[in-house]
């Protein structure tokens, strides 16, 4: 490498007479300049190693030469464009239990329920009225009419029945069961009970408390009062409506035999009726026990 001085260059320029020599000399000058700059950079780099505050001394050569330099911090830029939607976050923890909500509205009416179980058999009703006589039957078969053996057998059965019924009637009289012309059988074994129990006593025997509808029936009841020397219950009462006396089946009375001043609902507590030994009726408290007389 050659290190040429300006005086040497001028000296060479005077001594040279060709353009080629001039170009060659200029090129060499440029190379010399850059060689010195390179040496300066190497020197500065080596010198700055190990220094703690070399901000001024160790500035890059580019800055020293004015080729580059660090300016002051610029102003804050404008806000960037809104970023794209981020990924779905993790599920949060369970929230606290909320307050009790308001009472709901009344629901619709439910469907009709199943029918209940069948009730027990009710008390036997009173006998209905006798029906009208039916129309005359067709003329019988001549063959059947001449079947004498059947007729004789039926006649024998009928005779047997009459004999049994005769015995039964005698037995009933011996037992004290009274038969009236209206077809009723009336009987008492002398049992004393309050009215409701007396009702049940006769019902359990497929009968009812006596409900006298004629003087003869009332006399039959009176005879049992005499026999047991006590008042005897009738089925008559005004339990449903005070002052309105009815038979046990609820029918209005068609016959009465009240004693003098009766019924008087004494102490406002007399809804049942007895027959006395002299056959007269009196309203009495239903809770008292009297002789039970049943009719069949
Ligand atoms: C009275 O008189 P006596 O005791 O038989 C009353 C009846 C009552 C009965 C109640 C005329 O009967 O009405 O049911 O007491 N007789 C009179 O014990 O007032
Ligand atoms: Ca009464
Ligand atoms: Ca009375």
Image: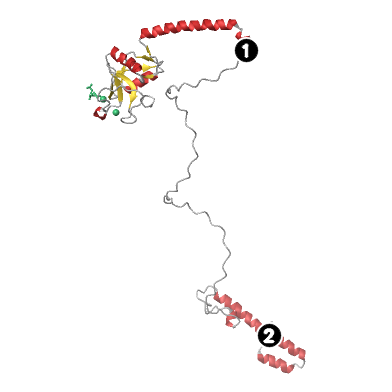
- Indicate left or right for 25 with 92 as reference: right
The local secondary structure at tag 2 comes to helix
| Front residue of this view, candidates 289 and 177 | 177
Where does the image place residue 84, in percent across and percent down from the top left? 58, 64
Residue identified by numbered label 1: 141
- Indicate left or right for 161 with 264 as reference: right
Residue 241 in the image: above or below residue 109: above
- Ligand 3 appears in which quadrant? top left
Label 1: few (<14), some (14–19) or many (≥20) C-alpha neighbours in 10 Å: few
Earlier residue among tags 1 and 2: 2
Q: Is mark 2 within 8 Å of ligand 2?
A: no
Of tags 1 and 2, the one toward the viewer is 1
Residue identified by numbered label 2: 30
The local secondary structure at tag 1 comes to loop
| Front residue of this view, candidates 296 and 259 | 259
| Front residue of this view, candidates 194 and 36 | 194
User: Where is residue 230, by image quadrant?
Assistant: top left
- Is the C terminus in the top left, top right, bottom left or bottom right quadrant? top left
């Amino acid at each position: 490498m050659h290190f040429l001085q300006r005086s040497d260059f001028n000296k060479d320029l005077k001594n040279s007479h060709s353009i080629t020599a001039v170009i060659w000399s200029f090129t060499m000058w440029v190379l010399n300049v850059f060689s010195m700059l390179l040496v300066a950079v190497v020197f500065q780099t080596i010198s700055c190693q190990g220094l703690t505050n070399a901000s001024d001394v160790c500035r890059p050569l580019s800055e020293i030469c004015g080729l580059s330099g660090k300016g002051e911090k610029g102003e804050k830029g404008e806000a960037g464009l809104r970023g794209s939607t981020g990924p779905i976050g993790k599920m949060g923890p369970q929230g606290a239990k909320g307050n009790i909500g308001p009472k709901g509205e009344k629901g619709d009416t439910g469907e009709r329920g199943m029918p209940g179980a069948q009730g027990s058999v009710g008390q036997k009703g009173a006998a209905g009225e006798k029906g009208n006589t039916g129309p005359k039957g067709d003329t019988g078969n001549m063959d059947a009419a001449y079947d004498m053996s059947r007729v004789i057998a039926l006649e024998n059965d009928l005779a047997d029945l009459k004999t049994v019924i005769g015995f039964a009637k005698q037995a009933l009289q011996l037992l004290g069961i009274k038969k009236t012309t209206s077809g009723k059988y009336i009987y008492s074994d002398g049992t004393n009970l309050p009215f409701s129990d007396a009702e049940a006593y006769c019902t359990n025997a497929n009968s009812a408390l006596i409900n006298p509808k004629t003087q003869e029936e009332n006399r039959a009841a009176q005879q049992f009062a005499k026999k047991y020397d006590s008042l005897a219950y009738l089925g008559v009462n005004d339990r449903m409506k005070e002052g309105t006396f009815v038979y046990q089946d609820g029918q209005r009375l068609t016959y009465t035999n009240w004693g003098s001043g009766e019924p008087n609902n004494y102490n406002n507590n007399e809804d049942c009726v007895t027959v006395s030994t002299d056959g007269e009726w009196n309203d009495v408290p239903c809770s008292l026990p009297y002789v039970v007389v049943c009719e069949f």
